[in-house]
Amino acid sequence: MNNIYTIFRKEMANYFNSPIAYIFVAVFLISSTWLFFQNFFLNGQATMRGYFYFLPWIFLFLAPAISMRSFAEERRSGTLELLLTLPVKDWEVVLGKFLSNVIFITITILLSITVPISINILGQIDMGTVIGGYLGAILLASSYLSLGLFVSSFTKNQIVAFIISIAGLFFLFILGANFVLNVIPTFLVPIFSFLGLGTHFDNITKGVVDTRDLIYYFSFIFLFLWLTVRSIESRNWK
Amino acid sequence: MINIENLTKKYQDKKVLNNISFNVKKGEILGFLGPNGAGKTTTLRIITGFIAPTKGKVKVAKIDLSKDSLSVRKKIGYLAENNPLYDDMKVYEFLYFIASLKGVKKEKIVRKIREINKTCGLEKVISRPINELSKGYKQRVGLAQAMINNPEILILDEPTSGLDPNQIVEIRELIKKIGEEKTVIFSTHILSEVQAVCDRIIIIHNGKIVASGTSEELLKSTGSKKTIYVKIKGNRDEVLGQLKRIEGADDVNIKDKESDNVYGYEIKSEKNIDLREKLSTKVMKNNWSILEFRKEEKGLEDVFRKLTK
């Protein structure tokens, strides 16, 4: 536990000691609120639906931007050798890094709390969908990060990690999208729609927190963290 | 302390290490010598648990590395090749981070850092970011990081590479000081370093151990002939002819020429024969004069070159 916390703290300090964190937060808040408020007054409804609609697409680029350096940078600068020869278990390293990514993106997401507050001044907002939306956003972002972490673990080039993560996430996201579901054979539809990252997000933002969606996200995260640990261990059977 | 048995490492089809075995005793400073690409770093990486061997066994303090790498890693302080450090951290933060991951108790960390600060001479830079430090100071931070939890074994991969001569001497002194209490393995391709610091030397080439022993032993085992250099004033052909006639002189050559009738000669003989006396009587008899006279020592450099060509 201690080791995870130590690594977590170092990674967090790393974000906030460099301009990356502040740039990241600013880009996220500006782009998401701007996209949202563009149409907000046209609709004239006191709801955050539109806000959560954009999030998966914004995260598609921002989550890999956070996770890309996790291992790639350590590999490039050689510090991975330093870290992995310390008496620390591989999964502790992976978990410490993952948690720091998750907490960082959670802080970023929660900073957008001004949006529901502003809406609430304009009209009554349904708190259930807002809380559901935030929960879903955090789960979705964490899933993105777990995949990004995995990709980052087998390259020393951050840009490669970034682009492959985006490609992978994009693929998994559109798997459950309507235009894909329309063209595949009918018996595959439930499978594809279950595997798609986006489908579960839609459910949660509607304010419905179904265990199936939670299980999906948690197993997704678990799978990719497990793969990351395997990938780090792979130095042992190369 | 460290037992290595039949270590083999293949990358694809290339054998980087080929059946290496050696032991390191407690308290010994072992120099790991070899040209670039000989397999030094690979061996050290295997001992520290960063990579696994294709075949073979590593035991550290009787613990099998493949079974319990975590306990082994606790006993080893490691300075990796090129000294990787978290550049954006301050020295103090970095040492704190490493110390807590090495399991130093929280209440002891500050005291430990203070101690290591003194041993490694980091007082001036302790609160500065690592990326602002000179290479010599970075190297000291690397050593400090390796020693922070007072490990029994230190493994240093080319600790002096890229330093200036003053820094090299400083780091070397530091290693010597550390080596008084700890088992140290360090790799290098600088020969004078090994001679200055190590109790024992292992020379590795193309993934194989080609020699092992103290520096005297290595010198003896390979330098099969003794060489005397003498500069004599006298007729060249006459001198050469007479010298060749000395009993026990296997090979006489002219090495250099100073002026007419002043030449330097090299006389080789078997190890156990001492030609010096015979040589001087010969010179006196012929009324020549000796201008220079010395025993040529075969250095470790020759041994190294001979073994790793």
Image (cartoon, coloured by chain):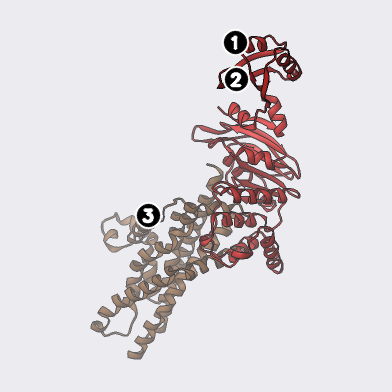
Chain colours: A brown, B red
Looking at the rendered image, the quarter that the C terminus of chain B falls into is: top right
Q: Chain of mark 3?
A: A
Mark pair 2, 3: CA separation? 76 Å
Q: Amino acid at mark 2?
A: Val
Using the rendered image, report if marks 3 and 1 lie on a common chain: no
Residue in front for this viewpoint, B264 or B223: B264
Residue A87 visible in image: no
Q: Amino acid at mark 1?
A: Asp
Residue in front for this viewpoint, B75 or A224: B75
Name the spot of residue A183 as percent of width and height, x first: 26, 56
Mark pair 1, 2: CA separation? 11 Å
Residue that mark 1 sits on: B237
Q: Amino acid at mark 3?
A: Ile
Badge 2 density bin: few <14, some 14–19, many ≥20, Cα 10 Å: some
Indicate which disc, 1 or 2, sits on the residue closer to the N terminus.
1
Badge 3 density bin: few <14, some 14–19, many ≥20, Cα 10 Å: some
State whether residue B64 is above or below residue B145: above
Mark sitting on residue B262: 2
Q: Are marks 2 and 3 in contact (CB under 8 Å)?
A: no
Q: Are marks 1 and 2 in contact (CB under 8 Å)?
A: no
Residue that mark 3 sits on: A164
